[in-house]
Amino acid sequence: MDKFFSVADIDDLDSVVQEALSLKTNPYNWRELGKNKTLGLVFLNPSLRTRLSTQKAAMSLGMDVMVINMDKEGWALETQDGVIMNGTTVEHIREAAAVMGEYCDILGLRSFPSLKDKEADYTEELFNKFVKFCRVPVVSLESATRHPLQSLTDLITITEHKKVTKPKVVLAWAPHVKALPQAVPNSFSEWMCKAQEQDLVDFTIAHPIGYELSEEFTTGARIVNDLDRALEEADFVYVKNWSSYHDYGKVFPVEGDWLMTNAKLGLTNDAKVMHCLPVRRDLELSSEILDGPNSLVIKEAGNRVWAAQVVLKRMLENLK
Ligand code: CP
């Protein structure tokens, strides 16, 4: 594996999940693999889980890790070609990425979307430029349109906790006060659609009218606009807010009650509830669920380590 950007970088989902679970059982068996290899983690946006879990995974594989918060510590980056840099940007991504590639064997990049320029966001302009200019394998730590380490984690967590062979998984839109990216739901949806193709889950998306995701990510999913109907017989409910894709980056009032509560949980097959975190309590997800027995959010966050470790292990195995 020389890039981890989307579900397309994994052929057999069950085999990567089983490999991650075996790393969970024996995390330190591969320390020689990463010896004298350096991982650079580049953050253009904040992070808690992605940063710490990826660092931990790399250290368990014997790697050295360097982290840079480019937004706070690095030079202001220019990403456009053909501009005279006489404004606020100081360093072009062409040089910045190339230099980081000189220091590291593998790089990770987090870059959120603008939510203003749909074309630039959905062509993954920044991520693709970084990959091109750094010339080493790159793992996405969340890009404009996807969060593959989170989605792999989610599939690991579902596999660990499922009680039936093919559980019903519902991605449920939730309220928020801010415009959030579509990266997590896009990514979760494309992973679940592929998992459904491989007979691992039965997948439904529930969202209010106006919050349709791009069809690029949802082909094969059952899509409904009635949360209560979607929740019937659900084994897992994945709660997440996102802003509008079609009216790009916009948020607007919705009809009905979209906050997941214990009453709504009663409609399900005693579903486990997931969220990528961070979560705004009692706005996006109720405290009674977060603090109750059906919440998987902490175990899910814990599994971020094994998703990162299996991806880094496969990348290390592929290094020349
Ligand atoms: N879920 C997730 O990616 O968390 P962080 O933004 O804290 O990394």
Image (tube, rainbow, N blue to C red):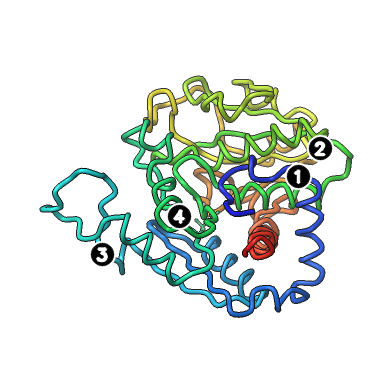
Say few, some or many: other residues with alpha carbon within 10 Å of mark 1 (under 14 / 14 to 19 / 20 or more).
Answer: some
Left or right, 134 with respect to 286, comes to left
Residue at image x 56%, y 27%? 216
Residue 130 x %, y %: 41, 52
**The CB of the residue at mark 4 lies under 8 Å from ligand 1:** yes
Residue found 61% across the figure and 34% down from its top: 172
- Which one is closest to the eye, mark 2 or mark 3? 3
Q: Are marks 3 and 1 in contact (CB under 8 Å)?
A: no
CA distance separating discs 3 and 1: 39 Å
- Point 49% across, 44% down: residue: 283
Disc 1 on helix, strand or loop?
helix
- Residue linked to disc 2: 200
**x 65%, y 78%: residue:** 62
For the residues labelled 3 and 4, the Cα–Cα distance comes to 16 Å
Which label is found at residue 110? 4
Is the CB of the residue bearing disc 1 within 8 angstroms of ligand 1? no
Which residue carries the number 1 mark? 13
Extreme-front residue of the structure: 320
Task: Name the N-terminal-most of marks 4 and 2.
Answer: 4
Q: Quadrant of residue 225?
A: top right
